[in-house]
Image: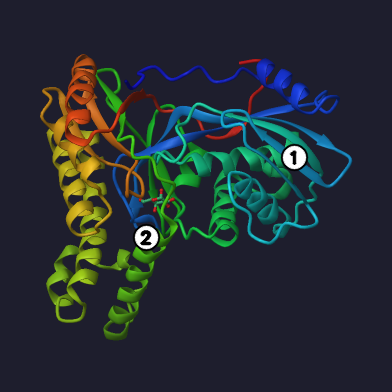
Amino acid sequence: MGSSAAPAPWTPGELRVALEAAFPGAGAEAVVVRAPGRVNLIGEHTDYNEGFVLPVAIDREIRIAAARQDDRRVEVVFLTTGERGAFSLDDLGPARTGSIAYVAGVAWALQEAGATLAGLRAVVASNLPIGAGLSSSAALELAAAWALLGPAGPAALGLDPMGLARLCQRAENEFVGVRCGLMDQFAAALGDPQGALLLDCRSLAWRVVPLPLASHALVVCHTGSARRLDASAYNERRAACERAVAVLAAHDPAVRSLRDLGPDRLADLAPLLDPITLARVRHVVTENERVGATVRALEAGDLGAVGAAFAASHASLRDDYGVSSPELDAMVEIATSVEGVVGARMTGAGFGGCTVNLVRRDAVDRLRAAVEAEYPRRTGLTPAVYPVEPAAGAGIIAGDG
Ligand code: GLA
């Protein structure tokens, strides 16, 4: 049945030993880097519509030990899965598959930005469930960027962490082929142990929003229906939003993205859009409102309003945006029936993966027990329940911590 505590991440010392075992003689000057996964509290499928998101970087992460070489080859062993991959920095295309595609994509984007890279031998470890909707790909991208850049870090390229996040998003958009927004790379780059990160995806202004973590925990519930981000369904949703903007802009040139629409405009749009596209637009417009409502509620200590926003977000993703699943719906229903669960909703792209729950600390065990008893009965699948804490963004790990 699902585990509760995060498996301890590999220590830098253990990673250096693994690097030496995988690539004998390569690892004397290894740099060890890390990048966290994320859970999104609210603001789903809003980032690529220039809206608002509220993710939290979490204490489950990807770590890489990497040693630079005097050649142009990047060779990587993924310790958690046993996967191996390699490429030449002089021959990054054509498209690759598997985890190495993210590393190659970041190398491509760094070189496009003018970086002079050296060959690398690296081992990658993770205590982040893969394909669960917790942004293992963005974490791998950010960790790979720090590993490829070495001790000088992104500053040597004139990039701050936001700039590095955008570069990794470019790698995923243009090299891997998923037209994701900026949220995941942003959270992996700029995570803060103090709480959630409110990002305006148009201006890129952001700030930390504290969470009531003395009394409440963030709990991730994995449906066990792990899917890699379904690129075709995701890209199709994004294309529908872009088509809607094109139609609406023809009537009102002030509309540059769905961000420009408030809920008061929804009734006027009905004659212009087919019913499915109208539902997609309604989700984005109302979800942006819910991010604002959630931040105000958190700042006012009104957790009932946070729970209401989570419930409305889940219903909107299920009914209007069409990205939930029977498993996600069952998980949310089970959690919502547990006393002490403030809010529950699907998190991330959807189509499987995880829910996020804000739970009174004294109710975490009760939630776990309810999920472990009810969820397999309803779905035939094995769930996992992970309490998570906010964590810092990507960077080099100094020492052996
Ligand atoms: C994925 C993408 C993000 C975002 C979410 C949905 O995680 O990578 O950019 O669009 O889906 O909110």
Instruction: Pick the residue in front: 210 or 349.
Output: 349
Residue 159: x, y in percent? 65, 48
Which mark is on residue 75?
1
Position of 164 relative to 257 (above/below): above
Quarter of the picture holding the C terminus: top right
Residue 93: give x, y in percent of width and height: 70, 60
Q: Secondary structure at mark 1?
A: strand
Q: Residue furthest front?
A: 380
Residue 233: name its quadrant: bottom left
Q: Which residue is mark 2?
A: 233
Dividing the picture into quadrants, the one containing residue 154 is top right
User: Does the image show residue 8?
Assistant: yes
**Residue shown at 59% from the left, 55% from the top:** 171
Q: Which residue is rendered at x = 75% and y = 52% of the image?
A: 115
Q: Tell me which label, 2 or 1, sits earlier in the chain.
A: 1
Q: How far from the left and from the top, in percent, is residue 325?
A: 25, 48
Q: Is residue 298 above or below residue 113?
A: above
**Circles 2, 1 touching at the beta carbon (< 8 Å):** no
| Amino acid on which the number 2 mark rests in the picture | Ala
Q: Tag 1: residue type?
A: Glu
Mark 1 surroundings: few (<14), some (14-19) or many (≥20) residues within 10 A: many
Point out residue 222 in the picture as x, y percentages from the top left corner.
32, 33
**Residue at left offset 62%, top offset 28%:** 79
In the figure, 30 relative to 328: above or below?
above
Within the image, what quadrant is residue 196 found in?
top left
Residues at marks 2 and 1, CA–CA distance in whole angstroms: 32 Å
Circle 2 packing at 10 Å, graded few (<14), some (14-19), many (20+), is some
Left/right placement of residue 77 relative to residue 129 reads right
